[in-house]
Image (cartoon, rainbow, N blue to C red):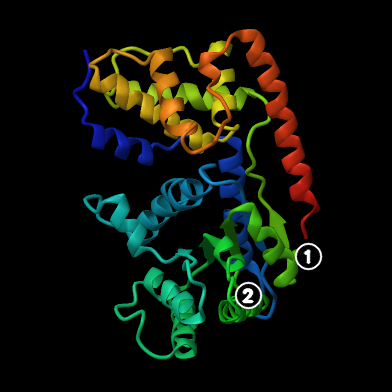
């Protein structure tokens, strides 16, 4: 019997689970490469940048905001600064300034953008002074702190400036980012695919950037299945369940592939919803019924999928898998045409 872990705790556990996969590994290695370039180049050599664009709930923010710091930055800073082992990883992440994680404000005006950088730097008064003074202060602190890489998440906010004033502000920010790259600051831009035009065209720095592919899975590759199985192991290790679930069964992983539109983040959310249902019922493990209910209440509600693949037979599923693969390939081709 389970149910020993609270619903709130299950949600927290899933947010903190870290599962390595090739897309995440490629992103982290690229960020490490950009940091190394920063350390090796001359002061007057411009930096390179990279962009990681993918649909919502693909796991991109979790990779750059959690996986990367826990895997590389926190251990490195602990060693360099001889941090007391009693200090938590979360506090070390705040203390270190090797890599700065900045969320682009929802309303992209220069003052808020500069304040976001200052907040990431730990400035006690990020909203003090006029916008350009804030920016000057942020650039000074970046230099003084020895920042080696900037990660700008929610970069697609710069493409949502619908009013003339906000469009002007977004353009100013893009010009500033371009200048920062030219002055040697490596960056990673993270956001929805809609940001690609802004990054490659409006900023006019496409030739200085590398793409980190983080798109959805068109087919149930080995890696997709291993990700699901890793979640199962984590649920067992953390005490959510007493027995494992056969995620390696094609009848399971193929249905999850369609239900989650091939996105690992949505797969995690779906399994989390199912896990909460099973745990509340004090079941020792997940069941297909729990996954079906999770898809109905989460995936279908948010229109991630058009139907519940757990409610159809294998022959119908085969047609669904073909349609899913075609849809993902068409999406990739359309995205490749942008910029």
Which quadrant is home to the C terminus? bottom right
Please provide percent x and percent y for residue 125.
31, 81
Q: Local crowd at mark 1 within 10 Å, few (<14), some, or many (≥20)?
A: few
Identify which residue, 334 or 243, lies in the foreground.
334
At horizontal 71% and vertical 34% (from top left) the residue drawn is 327
Residue 237 visible here: no
Figure quadrant of residue 17 = top left
Distance between the alpha carbons at the discs numbered 2 and 1: 15 Å
Crowding at mark 2 (Cα within 10 Å: few <14, some 14-19, many 20+) = some
Q: Is residue 185 left or right of residue 271?
A: right
Above or below, 36 against 42 in this view is above
Q: Nearer the viewer, mark 2 or mark 1?
A: 2
Using the rendered image of the protein, determine whether residue 150 is visible from the camera's viewpoint.
Answer: yes
Provide the residue designation for mark 2: 174
Disc 1 target residue: 207
Q: Position of residue 88 (x, y in %)?
A: 26, 51
Q: Within the image, what quadrant is residue 233 found in?
A: top left
Using the image, determine if residue 7 lies above or below residue 81. above
Disc 2 element: helix
Q: Is residue 90 left or right of residue 264?
A: left
In this rendering, position of residue 142 left or right of residue 261: left
Q: Nearer the viewer, residue 174 or 334?
A: 334
Q: Is residue 156 above or below residue 3?
A: below
Q: Position of residue 152 (x, y in %)?
A: 53, 63
Residue 65: image location, x then y, percent: 45, 52
Q: Quadrant of residue 73?
A: bottom left
Which dot marks residue 29?
none
Q: Residue at x 46, y 26 (%)?
A: 295
SS category of the residue bearing label 1: helix
């Amino acid at each position: 019997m389970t149910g020993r872990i609270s619903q709130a705790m299950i949600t927290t556990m899933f947010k903190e689970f870290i599962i390595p996969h090739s897309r995440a590994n490629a992103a982290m290695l690229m960020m490490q490469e950009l940091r190394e370039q920063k350390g090796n180049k001359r002061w007057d050599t411009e930096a390179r940048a990279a962009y990681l664009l993918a649909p919502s709930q693909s796991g991109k923010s979790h990779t750059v905001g959690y996986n990367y710091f826990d895997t590389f930055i926190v251990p490195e800073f602990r060693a360099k600064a001889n941090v007391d082992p009693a200090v938590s990883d979360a506090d070390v992440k705040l203390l270190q300034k090797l890599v700065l994680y900045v969320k682009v404000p929802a309303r992209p005006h220069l003052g808020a953008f500069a304040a976001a950088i200052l907040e990431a730097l730990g400035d006690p008064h990020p909203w003090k002074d006029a916008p350009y003074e804030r920016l000057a202060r942020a650039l000074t602190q970046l230099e003084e702190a020895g920042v080696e890489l900037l990660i700008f998440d929610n970069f697609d906010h710069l493409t949502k400036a619908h009013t003339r004033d906000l469009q002007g502000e977004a353009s100013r920010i893009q010009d500033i980012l371009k200048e920062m790259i030219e002055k040697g600051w490596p960056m990673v831009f993270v956001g929805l695919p809609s940001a690609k035009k802004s990054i490659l065209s409006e900023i006019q720095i496409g030739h200085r950037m590398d793409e980190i592919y983080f798109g959805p899975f068109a087919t149930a590759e080995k890696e997709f299945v291993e990700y699901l199985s890793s979640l199962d192991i984590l649920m067992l290790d953390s005490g959510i369940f007493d027995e494992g679930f056969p995620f390696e069964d094609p009848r399971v992983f193929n249905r999850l592939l369609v239900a989650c539109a091939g996105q690992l983040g949505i797969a995690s959310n779906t399994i989390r919803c199912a896990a909460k249902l099973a745990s509340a019922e004090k079941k020792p493990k997940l069941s297909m019924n729990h996954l079906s209910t999770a898809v109905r209440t989460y995936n279908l509600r948010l229109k991630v999928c058009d139907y519940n693949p757990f409610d159809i037979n294998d022959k119908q599923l085969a047609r669904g898998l073909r349609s899913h693969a075609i849809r993902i390939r068409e999406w990739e081709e359309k995205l490749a045409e942008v910029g």
